[in-house]
Image (tube, rainbow, N blue to C red):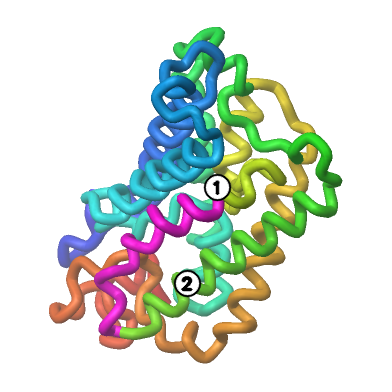
Amino acid sequence: MTEPGGHPSRWQLLISECVGTAVLLLVGLSVVIFMFGTGTPMANLIPSEALRRFVTGFLFGSTGALIALSPIGKLSGAHINPAVSLGFSLMGKLRPDLALGYVGAQLIGAVLGSLPLLAWGAMGRSVVFGVTVPGTGYSTTTALIGEVIGTFVMVALLCVFLGFRELRRFTPGIFPPLYGVMVWLEAPISGTSTNPARSFGPSVVSGVWEGWWIYWLGPAVGMLFAIMACSRLAKRIEVAKLYYFDVGHGEFLSGRKAAFRKTAVS
């Protein structure tokens, strides 16, 4: 049900975030399983584990970018990450109550998207269905720092791209190369989450909760540092969306006091 004027209702926004997060985890973690699960043909096709990490991250980021460009992204903004939603709220672009609703929807979506991963059977179990845990030989502190840095870079780039009108339409394009590089470099340390929902879903399915707090605290701290470092750019962001579908029409621009503000953007 839409609000007067054809704008999305609160439930449409929350369902959109739930579905978007479910798709991200189902597709993204299926890529992880297919790339690294025991018995995968990709081990012979791409023998280099580092290269497989880069490809995995690139495809994971591409999934997020496509969600941002989809009708789902048009509705809710395709945050699909609690750190992003809470960050928009701290920047004054998303009402706190709706931000918390987004987080709840994302966590539910993460579980729903992870449940079908059980169909991968032994191959999925061999990589614990894509769960994130500190890497062998790395301390929890090192893994935490990795998550802080990764999330800082991600949120800072969002502030840069969303803060300048000339760059906004390219915002979804940052995710494939960004996650390609981050997974290549950082996955052996923490698993490269930068997204509490991404870590929550496979932990529920697998029952593995080792170092679970890292994947909440790390993204939260990284997000806070990024917002402080990019505070001036944050003020330039007009709407809590990763892609501006309706730039020029004012439909979603908070600066023009569009009706959408009543449901999502302050």
Which secondary structure lies at badge 2? helix
261 relative to 76, above or below: below
Bounds of the magenta span? 165-182
Name the outermost residue toward the bottom.
Answer: 232
Which of 98 and 132 lies nearest the eye of the viewer? 132
31 relative to 69, above or below: above
Mark closer to the observer (1, 2): 1
Looking at the image, residue 92 sits to the left or right of residue 55; the answer is right
Q: Tag count in the figure?
A: 2
Looking at the image, residue 152 sits to the left or right of residue 233; the answer is right
Residue 171 within the magenta-colored segment of the rendering: yes
Measuring from the top left, give residue 259's x and y in whole percent. 26, 73
Q: What residue do we see at 43% from left, 29% from top?
A: 46
Q: What residue do we see at 66% from left, 72% from top?
A: 224
Q: What residue do we see at 50% from left, 11% from top?
A: 39
User: Residue 257, can we see it?
Assistant: yes
User: Residue 109, can we see it?
Assistant: no
Could you say which quadrant of the image residue 210 lies in?
Answer: top right
Name the residue type under label 2.
Leu
Could you say which quadrant of the image residue 266 lies in?
Answer: bottom left
Which of 101 and 90 lies nearest the eye of the viewer? 90
Measuring from the top left, give residue 80's x and y in whole percent. 45, 50
Measuring from the top left, give residue 146's x and y in whole percent. 70, 56
Badge 1 crowding class, 10 Å Cα cut-off, few under 14, some 14 to 19, many 20 or more, is many
Badge 2 crowding class, 10 Å Cα cut-off, few under 14, some 14 to 19, many 20 or more, is some
Query: Circle 1 is placed at which residue position?
Result: 183
Name the residue type under label 1.
Val
Query: Circle 2 is placed at which residue position?
Result: 157
Disc 1 or 2, which lies upstream in sequence?
2
Which of 163 and 31 lies nearest the eye of the viewer? 31
